[in-house]
Image (tube, rainbow, N blue to C red):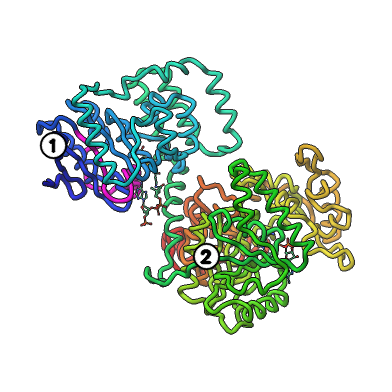
Amino acid sequence: MAETVSESVRLETEGDVALVIVDNPPVNALSWHVRQGLFDGITQASESGAKAIVVICDGRTFIAGADISEFGGGAPQAVGLQEVQSAMEDAPVPVIAAIHGTALGGGLEVALCAHYRVAVSSAKFGLPEVNLGLLPGAGGTQRLPRLVGVPKALEMMTTGRHISSAEALDGGLIDDVVDGDVAALRAAAVAFANRAVAENLPLLRVRDRDDKVAEARGDEQMFADFRRSIARKTRGFLAPEYNIRCIEAAANLPFDEGLKVEGKLFMELMTGPQSAAQRYYFFAERAANKIPDIAKDTEILDIQHVGVLGAGTMGGGIAMNFANVGIPVTIVERDQASLDKGLGVVRKNYERSRSTTAEQVEERMALITGSTDKNDFADCDMVIEAVFEDMALKQSIFRELDEICKPGALLASNTSALDVNEIASVTSRPESVIGMHFFSPANVMKLLENVRGDKSSDSVVATTMAIGKKIKKVSVMVGVCPGFVGNRMLFMRGAEAERMILEGATPAQIDNVLDEFGFPMGPFSMMDLAGLDIGWKEETSSSSTVREILCENGRRGQKNGRGYYTYDPETRAATPDPEVVELIKEFAVEQGIEQREVSDQEILERLLYPMVNEGAKILEEKIAIRGSDIDVVWVNGYGWPVYRGGPMHWADSVGLAEIVEKIEGYSSSLGGKHWELSPLLKSLAESGGQLQTHAS
Ligand code: T1G
Ligand code: NAD
């Protein structure tokens, strides 16, 4: 017989065992009523004469953490997590945590306060707070290393990685694993509880364990080595270092002292801009999945066989995404040589990947069938075109696909900037045509910019979002305009970058400004990586741009070791090249442009404010559904540092009034379309509105 304790927690009994059951969909987050219910439930069960207590959850997962949506405040007063945890740890009878789905963050911290942990074999465990710019603030930094040891705790807490049940059992995090579903878990946990009573097993409090942390006590070298090993990957992020400091405290201080260190560092992060940005971004990525005018029950096409046209830079990577999730792919090239080259690159990429076993390489290669005949697309459910960026070529291709492909097949173009409506207009089924803009390397980059045509059907729109999730991409739906969202804003940044090198800033100076800001690389390193000669033809070159002049001087970028930078043939390290600065200076003189000192602050404003302005125009034109979608595009597709939230969130944090004033200044001093102020930006600045929450 169940007894309700709070709106999301109930008590049940099975013999001598009391079960405290949490039911707070979708992920049993530790909302105030869950904490209150857990505390009241554990207390009641402890006083009920029950000989043991099992904490278990309904739904798809054990507690997946604190309720992030409550961090902004406003939730009703309720007991804190520490009260819940003390009630569990200090209970007079064995407390067993029964885990399925994902025990994450505060959820794992609750489980660490049980005396024993039992899980289903499919369960996952993690302290991913670092991905929210935080650290585990409910004792996890002190209890996890006491169970799994310092090295594992360091790795888990600075990566946020979810580990499997097998790894958790092996590492001492859990005590038993059972195959099956929640019902099997409940039975196993009750049996474990009864055995604990029968065998009078000790009430093990993790906080009392010391052996695992003692191994690292005073071992400064180990911590220094670990810091060095993650320095490059965590550059600019505060939270990883704060997590390490807490684990150092766990190794070197008594439990309660360590808990104080954790509490202090947690609040520093919680009240700082980085975590605010990363928590905003957590919900932004989930919001991007939702297309307001597409009904939840819209038909999703069943994609069992995919076709990819073109096995060049993009085609090969696109095919890998589908093979990686077990979907057969037919990839078609214009001739055998191009096909062999493309498939060769795919195999090499698989063989190079550390996460792919030799057996998996063969499995995935077996799912990719090469051909030079487009008729082999006849029974594909979806075809993605990735041939040269040329409208006439793409239109002739779509005319052919319209003939070849079965009715209802989804026809997508990977164009990076061309008009998807124009491509669709040459077919008899524009409702089946849409843009699916992957990013290079397509098997690595997480972003998928889906480009909705005027006639793309609801089912085609919903299917591209669903298939994006299936191939583990972060999908964002955007409208048709030149360059869509990402490239369109990038063009504005590029225009100012090219202007400033003529005014006296060097390519290295400009790249360093973005490097400091947190981007993986600046515009000039990016151009060198992509190749300076993309779209360049020697016979028509006329020294009319810096890029043409560099190409005319034999500079192609990284591919020939000379571009805006010179590259070490062994290490690929880039060195600023005074010859390039000289070439730019000469061209500036020819253009009558006087060179001057350009400050880093001016460079930052002139690179990022035009992007913000263009983002606002994109919202005005309803090309993006909401401001936060623009941030998801930039974080996942263009390396915008997530601890700054994205260009819209960042602009709001700088202050829109400040940015409007600067844009008006640059517009009158520099001119150019990209400095024409967006009316939306102006009105939001005046009304105190925000870009990140603006829904178009
Ligand atoms: N709080 C509030 N809402 C949450 C949530 C959370 N912790 N986790 C998920 N949701 C919502 C999410 O917004 C979405 O809502 C729905 O649940 C499904 O999520 C004290 C301080 C669990 C692996 O970082 O990693 O504990 O969009 O689409 O792909 O130390 O969600 O449907 O309206 O992601 O199946 C630590 C965060 C918190 C885990 C499921 N915990 N969540 O993935 O579904 S900080 C985390 C996830 C903390 C303590 C600290 C994933 C998931 P909507 P979803 P999914
Ligand atoms: P690429 O030149 O590397 O590859 C294009 C491939 O298409 C070549 O292998 C070519 O042989 C093949 N091809 C050309 N005509 C064909 C035909 N009629 N039938 C079959 N195959 C044919 O180009 P890419 O970089 O892979 O770009 C492909 C598309 O993806 C373009 O629209 C581009 O704008 C877009 N895109 C490129 C990038 C990038 O970073 N390279 C990123 C996103 C989108």
Label 2 environment density (alpha carbons within 10 Å; few <14, some 14–19, many ≥20) = some
**Mark 1 Cβ inside 8 Å of ligand 1:** no
| Residue drawn at the location 73% of the way across and 51% of the way down | 529
Would residue 559 appear left or right of 357 to someone viewing this image? right
Q: Give the CA distance from mark 2 to mark 1.
A: 49 Å
> What is the span of residues highlighted in magenta in the rendered image?
53-80
Q: Position of residue 324 (x, y in %)?
A: 56, 53
Foreground: 296 or 98? 98
Which labelled disc corresponds to residue 667? Answer: none
Q: Which residue is mark 1?
A: 15
Residue ranking furthest to the bottom: 428
Label whose residue precedes the other's in the sequence (2 or 1):
1
Identify the amino acid type marked 1: Gly
Query: Is residue 663 something one can see in this rendering?
Result: yes
Q: Is residue 345 above or below residue 672?
A: above
Would residue 439 appear left or right of 561 to someone viewing this image? left
Q: Secondary structure at mark 1?
A: loop
Q: Which residue is mark 2?
A: 304
Identify the amino acid type marked 2: Gln
